[in-house]
Image: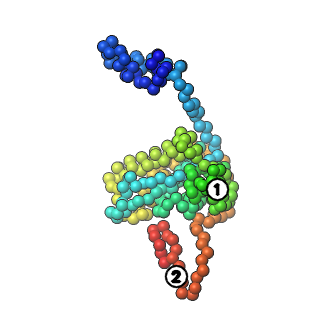
Amino acid sequence: MPLLESNPALQPITLEEKAPNQFDHSHLRALQRKVKKWRAKLGPEQEVMFLQRHIVGDMGISDYTWMNKLKITLAGELFEHKLYHYRLVYSGWTYVQVCLGGESFESLSSGLQNSFWRSGGVPAMHRTDSLSAAFNNHSEQEVLTERYRKLCQHFSVKATRNNKGVAHKNGAIESARGHLKRKIDQQLLLRGSRDFLTLSDYETFINLIIAKINCRCKTHFDEEKPHLQALPSRRTNDFREQYVKVTLRSRIRALCPQGNRT
């Protein structure tokens, strides 16, 4: 006990070494139980974590995840990409779409609006991490970008942000993201190949996995759906507006997901 009081980080196997030739390895389990009991009653204070209680219709969460480690190829060429991942926190209903560019406002707006329309309603709050497309990260306060503010205003949804550096408070999306990637990896193993002929084939493969996830949470989603806010009469912008001066002989080059196109 004096050793633990002076240095609570000491492990039972280390304490055992302080009394050489008096104990053998069969006594270790008993010592581990005693140390565990001491830490619970007299050891340093521990952070208290409470079980999160999710409210029906309250929140949807958006996130992006890199898929490069799964080494997916299209027609033999390595396909580097992200997935946009939306999830209703209460029911676990999920929407995913392939993201060919970065974490831009256009991909966030497109993915979020597709999620709302596919689920048939809008939660009270929408949460992301510190996406530059959604938040002005140079500000000390939580300041929304103008386009994201208008997007949330159009759908009457309150924007919130994840707790930085506190993963256990963001478990509704952090753990779901890991489960999703493992499911995709497992289905790739069953498929026997990570190569797809076209992007459309790969998207169909992803959509089948998401359909299975949503099938498992159908009961909770049926309970949650009536509590979602009604959709507006129309979608809003999911593209970038730019105003430029042109002449009669100018050429326009528009940004496309798969590169520039004139």
Q: Is residue 195 visible?
A: yes
Q: Residue furthest bottom?
A: 248
Image x and y of residue 50, in percent? 59, 33
Q: Which residue is at 61% across, 40% downward? A: 54
Side of 262 where 21 appears, left or right:
left
Under mark 2, the amino acid is: Arg
Residue 235 x %, y % = 63, 63
Label at residue 172: none
Question: Which residue appears farthest toward the front when viewing the image?
Answer: 6
Residue where numbered disc 2 is placed: 251
Q: Callout 1, which amino acid?
A: Leu
Q: Give the SS element for disc 1.
A: loop
- Looking at marks 2 and 1 on the same chain, the residue that comes earlier in the sequence is marked by 1
Which sits in the foreground, 42 or 123?
42
Along the viewing direction, whichever of 42 and 25 lies nearer the viewer: 42
What residue sits 48% from the left and 78% below the top?
Answer: 262
Crowding at mark 2 (Cα within 10 Å: few <14, some 14-19, many 20+): few
Q: Residue at x 46, y 48 (%)?
A: 180
Question: In x, y percent, where is residue 61?
Answer: 57, 49
Q: Is residue 175 above or below residue 195?
A: above
Does residue 181 lie above or below 202 as drawn?
above
25, above or below 240, in the image: above
Residue labelled with disc 1: 144
* Label 1 environment density (alpha carbons within 10 Å; few <14, some 14–19, many ≥20): many
Q: Nearer the viewer, residue 6 or 48?
A: 6
- Left or right of 221, for residue 7: left
Q: How many marks?
A: 2
Left-right relation of 17 to 6: left
